Amino acid sequence: MIIDKNDRYGKMYLFWSVFDQSILNLPERKVRKWIYINCRFLQMLQNVKVFWQHRKKCISRNLQVSTHVSALENELGKKLIRRTARNFELTEDGVKLYKYAIDILLLHRKAIMEVGGNGSEFLRIGTSSVPAQWFVPTILSGFLKKNVNTQVEMTSADSLDIIRRVKEGSLDIGFVGTKVEKQCKYIPLIKDHLVLAAPNTKKYQKIFSGESDSGESDLRQILEAPFLARRQYSGTMKEALGSLKYFGIEEEDLNIIATFDSAEMLRDCVEAGMGISILSYQMIRELHESGKILIYRLPEKEFCRELYLIYKNESFLPEIVKKFIHYTEKCFKKEF
């Protein structure tokens, strides 16, 4: 088989053949079909996921998705997806093909970086709100000064969204405030303290004056106030609710009057007098020091969490991802 290094199939073939010698003996037509099937399956699977996540809004896509799935299953002579009334799951053959598809896309990316292009490297980073405000800009700025040919695509989202995207491969690196997925590697970076924040008014000054380090009754009384919550994908909210359970306080016990996508908007609404909330101290430190927000210091043992750098747990990592991980760890040993 004649390989054209400028051809996308050729790039994938060159790098994949290093790991799977069996394809070296295949004719070009079969190699191209093999690569095409794997990549097509991954794309099809993403479409199916989108459909099931938004099925109420995407009924018109049902036939299109089913057609793609059926065509690929007919081409391979195997069932790839097991359908249920509300969801779908991969069959054993589907799982095998999915793993090949992921590997091919990763190798394709490596081929583009090492064989083609202008020498620039690409890094996809996602961060939740607290790391974004606290240390990510400093780390990113320093890293790019040392790696001038690197391009970065930044994404801001809740922790659980970032973890999902890293697991699925759409992000290389994530900075998050909770730990859930075994398919990701978690590197603890720094401890983050959660506090109960309230507007600086006479009402809350009176309530907070009786603060204690372990008084469940005090905490229960305070939490009767209007409570502002983050949505369910927030790492801060997940950790806060988990810590409250230690005191026998469930989410249903909170007087939740509003739920926010944005930690910044929630913080601003606390300052404006709308209610109280549990936030990272880093999010409200300046407002607290300037006297605009009161804080009730929660028991440190229960309301302290780790902030993590995460990446996908797999054998192949692009060199630029390894560099960034190493640089971040080095920064935290020196600066934070």
Image (tube, rainbow, N blue to C red):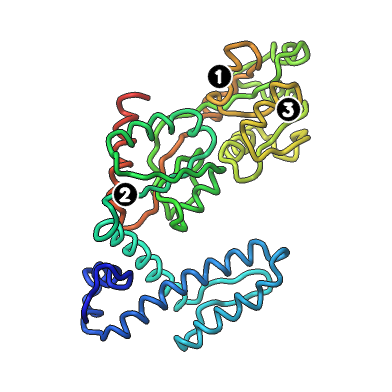
Q: Write down the quadrant of residue 204 in the picture.
A: top right
Identify the element where label 3 is drawn: loop
Q: Residue at x 58, y 22 (%)?
A: 284
Identify the element where label 2 is drawn: strand
Residue receiving disc 2 = 121
Q: Amino acid at mark 2?
A: Glu
Q: Write down the quadrant of residue 17 in the picture.
A: bottom left
Instruction: Locate residue 260, reporting x and y percent.
Output: 68, 38
Q: Which mark is residue 285?
A: 1
Whether residues under marks 2 and 3 lie with C-beta atoms below 8 angstroms apart, the answer is no
Residue receiving disc 3 = 223
**Spatial separation of the CA atoms under disc 3 and disc 1:** 21 Å
Q: Amino acid at mark 1?
A: Arg
Instruction: Locate residue 41, reporting x and y percent.
Output: 47, 74
Tell me if 191 is positioned left or right of 6 in this view. Answer: right
Q: Which mark is residue 336?
A: none
Tell me if 249 is positioned left or right of 188 in this view. Answer: right
Q: Amino acid at mark 3?
A: Leu
The image shows residue 15, relative to residue 292, as above or below, that is below
Instruction: Locate residue 50, reporting x and y percent.
Output: 60, 64
